[in-house]
Amino acid sequence: MKQVSAVCELVNHFGQGTVVVENKQYTIPGLLLGETAIVELQDNFKGIIVKIQKASPSRVKAPCPKHDECGGCQLQHMSYELQLELKTKQVKDALERYHLDSSVLLPTLGMKDPFFYRSKVQMAISEKGPKVMAGFYEENTHKIVNVDRCYIQDDIANNIIRTSRQLMTKHKIKAYQEDKELGLIRHIMVKRSPTTSQVLVVLITQEEKFPGRNNFVTDLRLAHPEITSIVQNVNNRKTSVVLGDFERILYGSGKIEDELLGKRFGISAKTFYQVNHRQTSLLYQKAIELAKPKKEDIVLDAYAGVGTIGILFADIVKKVIAVEINPQSVTNAIQNAKLNHVNNIRFYKDDAISFLSHLADEDAKFDIIVFDPPRSGLETNFIQELTRLKPKKIVYISCEPMTLARDLQVIVDSGYELKRVQPVDMFPQTFHVESITLLSLK
Ligand code: SAH
């Protein structure tokens, strides 16, 4: 392989440096803008750093010892200020690519302490000889990198997973081996509320039969009295989706409650809930601040999850209608409204597109429509129904700038003005960025 000294002239959205050698561009993970390094070039237009000759002032030593191997964090070698700048640029570039007005974009809102923030932790379990391992897949592979302490995960969750590994060895419970189709435990998930301190542990198994289950559960609770519920989830499919359909509660109620902005939200194993607690408060506060809801407003929350955004809006406005497709989320959402004595919200279990289509047929009127769809963004039909409903304001929360910008272009072309885009850093140390966008009817 060829080694050359090169200067990094660009950093892409994934935080990877790029260098140009003999008119060919190579991606060099870990290289920062302006740095000079000896790099080893590979055939696939990628390269690796051999030695940094001139380091950027924004380079920091990644605190996690597994940073170079693990695919989970991509930006730990960057100062946090630079990470935030990169994220703002990522959103700006996406907007400009779709010919949208990027002057409405604000700088990304960061965290004070951008480590140990994930309150939902999910680790793949495997074995190496007698050792049980828990970790993440190496970038672009199916190889698991063992991680004893993940620097972006809640540390109590880190400890629970470490104990679980020891107890698997003690009780001779095998990790599932994909290639041999042998063993039992595939993943362990921990959800913890930093405000109520409740902890839910989910053991994802290959089959329902779980010899040693009672002893394992007893020992885990003894070692971690902070655990408030344990659930077994069975997933025997060959898939990268972590959770299966069947669930059995092994201890507690099968859910936890979290307190956020003065409200309480019940969360189950299968329901979506934002993972960064501190930033979620900020995200929702900013969404409300931008939307400026009024007492007489009628609001629609599409992709409602366990009802967080809808319930927070309901406190301010006249009425909220919410739609969500996952039945467990809808059950949580209805209970959450009751738990918070919020009576002016109604949840519907439906597909967002068909629900909006019915509403538009009935000529329903909304002042604000707020939505936070999955990463893939909105389907064209959703935008069609949305613009048929003609709300005065649209609040679009998105975790993927490219699909956001793609969708915004269509919404703007249908008669809306782009008012504000506010990125919020929900996922420090990674290249992911969440944004809140406000649009208003022209
Ligand atoms: N607004 C919530 C949830 C956002 S996550 C929050 O901030 O916590 C996106 C949600 O969209 C998930 O709960 C998912 O189950 C739901 N969803 C995915 N596809 C959907 C569809 N076609 N119709 C309605 N909801 C959908």
Image (cartoon, rainbow, N blue to C red):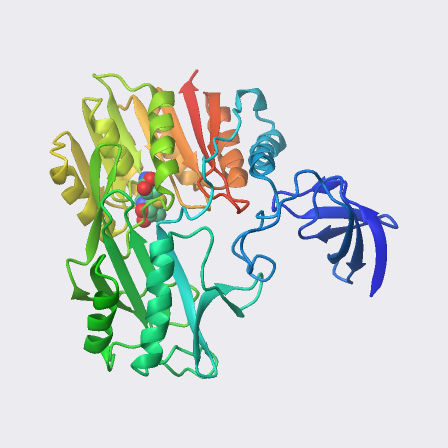
Q: Position of residue 261 (x, y in %)?
A: 26, 32
Quarter where residue 173 is shown: bottom left
Pick the front one: 216 or 273: 216
Quarter where residue 103 is shown: top right
Image side of residue 142 versus residue 291, left or right = right
Quadrant occupied by the C terminus: top left
Image side of residue 84 versus residue 217, left or right = right
Vertical side of 299 occupied by 358: above or below: below
Quadrant occupied by the N terminus: bottom right
Pick the front one: 361 or 426: 426
| Residue sticking out furthest to the right | 22
Quarter where residue 80 is shown: top right
Marker count (numbered): 0
Vertical side of 56 occupied by 299: above or below: above
Pick the front one: 390 or 282: 282
- Give the residue displayed 25% in from the left and 55% down from the top: 199
Image side of residue 228 versus residue 141, left or right = left
Image side of residue 344 versus residue 391, left or right = left
Pick the front one: 56 or 310: 56
- Give the residue displayed 39% in from the left and 77% down from the top: 176
Q: Position of residue 150 (x, y in %)?
A: 46, 57
Vertical side of 128 occupied by 311: above or below: above
Inspect this view and state whether residue 291 appears. yes
Q: Position of residue 81 (x, y in %)?
A: 57, 34
